[in-house]
Image: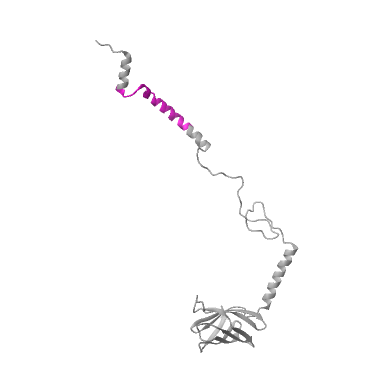
Amino acid sequence: MTRIRPAALVVLAFLFLGTSPARAQDPDLIGDLLKSAPADTEEEEADGGDLDLPEVSGTSPGRAGPASAPGQRVGVDDHSRTPEAPLGTAERTYEARLRAGYSAAQGRQGDLEGRWLVRSQAGPLYAFQLIDAGAGTLDGAWSDPRRPGSLTGSGYLRSASRTDGRLALTLEAPPHRGPVTLQLRSEAPGQWVGTLTEDGVQVAVRMQRD
């Protein structure tokens, strides 16, 4: 009868199981790693890990808000406004002169100042932007609503005059042959009636503010 040594039995046992003494210790090593992984993960999460977080500077550039009105108080929590120093003597004088000049210019304007529209029974014919400096002095520009966007559909008045409640306007409006003329009389405030001559054809028209 052949005796099998204990050491041989151990070798046979490992061969039968298909493992080696070194592999038999692997589950314990993997288990140790798994046991230590949660602790390491928690530490990384607590420390922020390897996440690329934007750096926050101590101060952020603020947007300049609208300036406050002169004399208006600005509170500490009023972030939408910025304090402004009151106007100095020179600045107040300059602003007063601007206002006075504007008021004087407005006072010198005549009642024809502004935009007007001339129309017949067929519809709008011409729009005028008149400049009335008073004392019968007129100037201005015209446009033809029938030809929007045309290079020849607008221009300056050739002549304009007003005397004794009558208004005469002349303009060159190619491709019309010869000048276009208007002879108007005042019917009521802001209302003028008369005739327009275009290409030798005369039509009754009315001019009123647009």
Which residue is at 31% across, 23% downward? 17
The x and y percentages for residue 7 are 33, 15
Which residue is at 39% across, 26% downward? 26
The quarter of the displayed image where residue 206 is located: bottom right
The x and y percentages for residue 130 are 60, 79
179 to 97, vertically: above or below: below
Question: Seen from this angle, which residue lies furthest left?
Answer: 1
The x and y percentages for residue 60 are 60, 48
The quarter of the displayed image where residue 132 is located: bottom right
Can the viewer see residue 142 in this picture?
no
Q: Main secondary structure of the magenta part?
A: helix
For this rendering, which residue is in front, 162 or 188?
162
Q: Is residue 18 magenta?
A: yes
135 to 30, vertically: above or below: below
In the figure, is residue 3 to the left or right of 122?
left
The quarter of the displayed image where residue 13 is located: top left
Residue range (magenta) = 16-39
Which residue is at 32% across, 17% downward? 10
12 to 137, vertically: above or below: above
Q: Give the colouring mode of the picture.
A: one colour
Question: Seen from this angle, which residue lies furthest top?
Answer: 1
Task: Please state the total of marks drawn on the protein image.
Answer: 0
Quadrant location, the C terminus = bottom right
The x and y percentages for residue 196 are 54, 86
Q: Is residue 146 magenta?
A: no
For this rendering, which residue is in front, 61 or 70?
61
Which residue is at 52% across, 36% downward? 46
Quadrant location, the N terminus = top left
Can the viewer see residue 107 in this picture?
yes
